[in-house]
Image (tube, grey):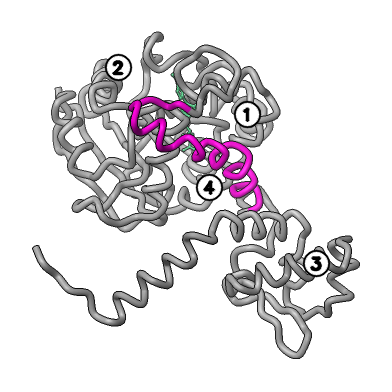
Amino acid sequence: MDRSLSHDERDLVLERFHLLVNAPALFNALVTALELDLFAALSGQPSSFDELRVVTGLPPHSLRVLLHAVCTTGLLERHDGWYTNSPVAEEMLTRDGPDSWRHILVGWREIYYPAFARLTEALKAGTNAALAAHPGDEPTLYQRLSHAPEQEAVFHRAMSAFTLRSVEALVETEEFASVHRLLDVGGGDGTTSARLTARYPQLSSTIFDIPSVSKLAERTTAPDFGDRVTVHPGDLFADPFPAGSDTVLFSHVLEIFSGEQIVTLLAKAHRILPPGGRVLIYGYNVSDDETKGWYSARLSLYLNALASGQGMAYPARDYEEWLRQADFQQVRTLTDYPYEHGLHIGVKLS
Ligand SMILES: C[S@@+](CC[C@H](N)C(=O)[O-])C[C@H]1O[C@@H](n2cnc3c(N)ncnc32)[C@H](O)[C@@H]1O
């Protein structure tokens, strides 16, 4: 089909092209600025170059180079020699806490982005070629990280921070008001279960994850939730799911795997649920026409270059089809979640 672009559309793509080809360097400048507390220092007040030298401890030439780089992104502004945060930087980059972008971007820099150097090789071979950089012989990054506890901690801090940015909308979904016993499959360090348990007094949760991650989950949840959040270490495919839950949640988990593996996992969930039990799948969805979603695209590429060598941010219709194949009924998708997320729901009727 021949479709000519308007001038505005062409200019937008051209501007994105120029940003894109410089983005790896600018991304690193942004992470460095976060690590040096630049945005926090500028919160609510302009600063001079000399004041920023004291804050960052950088030599003057290094600071000059860094400030120029961050100013080109629009995140910092410079007026009459004074530097200020842009409104976006003020809103998103000044606070440090468990959900801070610093944790997310340090994780992406340390673990995700080195792998992208092998993307062509990985996509040609159809395997996660970049996994070779991680010690061990297991087929996925998640399992291999258990041999490198410091990297595993960086990974889960980043995962947890990003999850905190999308989890509130999930937590407020009315489905959870009637959940009593949740099985949080691939529940990671427990961030999602902790938020749900804090919000719903009737809800208790069991986190199912590999043993090293289960230890992280125990450490984050035990002090605040006692036995309302428990862990059940195991392997998704090799071990049975614990029985006794009325709802099974897969949050940011199924997208790691192939369609066939996803049906296997959904069928396992179906087997342990009572009649009336539900399965909830939360994660990234590409648009139906598979042309939109920067966050989904990044995730899909990372999964295929590094994490598992398969999977993607599948569109909603794929999950709905797999839920039906696993015998779930009343299948539906809730949309309008942040960061390109969707929630897919199926009910076990009998
Ligand atoms: C992307 S993280 C999602 C964490 C959490 N559910 C969230 O939304 O923040 C995927 C989780 O699946 C777990 N996982 C991956 N493969 C697994 C396997 N074979 N058995 C058990 N857990 C696995 C990982 O350890 C990791 O915690």
Mark 4 is on which residue type? Phe
Q: Nearer the viewer, mark 1 or mark 3?
A: 3
Q: Quadrant of residue 343?
A: top left
Residue 272: numbered disc: 2
Q: Is residue 131 magenta?
A: no
> Cβ(mark 1) to ligand 1 < 8 Å?
no
Mark 2 is on which residue type? Ile
* Residue at image point 60% right, 49% down: 105
Q: Position of residue 251 (x, y in %)?
A: 40, 36
Q: Give the CA distance from mark 4 to mark 3.
A: 29 Å
Q: Secondary structure at mark 1?
A: helix
Q: Disc 4, disc 2: CB below 8 Å?
A: no
Q: Nearer the viewer, mark 4 or mark 3?
A: 3
Q: Nearer the viewer, mark 3 or mark 2?
A: 3
Q: Disc 4, disc 3: CB below 8 Å?
A: no
Residue carrying label 1:
152
Mark 3 is on which residue type? Leu
Q: Position of residue 316 (x, y in %)?
A: 23, 44
Residue carrying label 3:
63
Residue 185 is left or right of residue 84, and the answer is left
Residue 252 is left or right of residue 157, and the answer is left
Q: Nearer the viewer, mark 4 or mark 2?
A: 4
Residue carrying label 4:
162
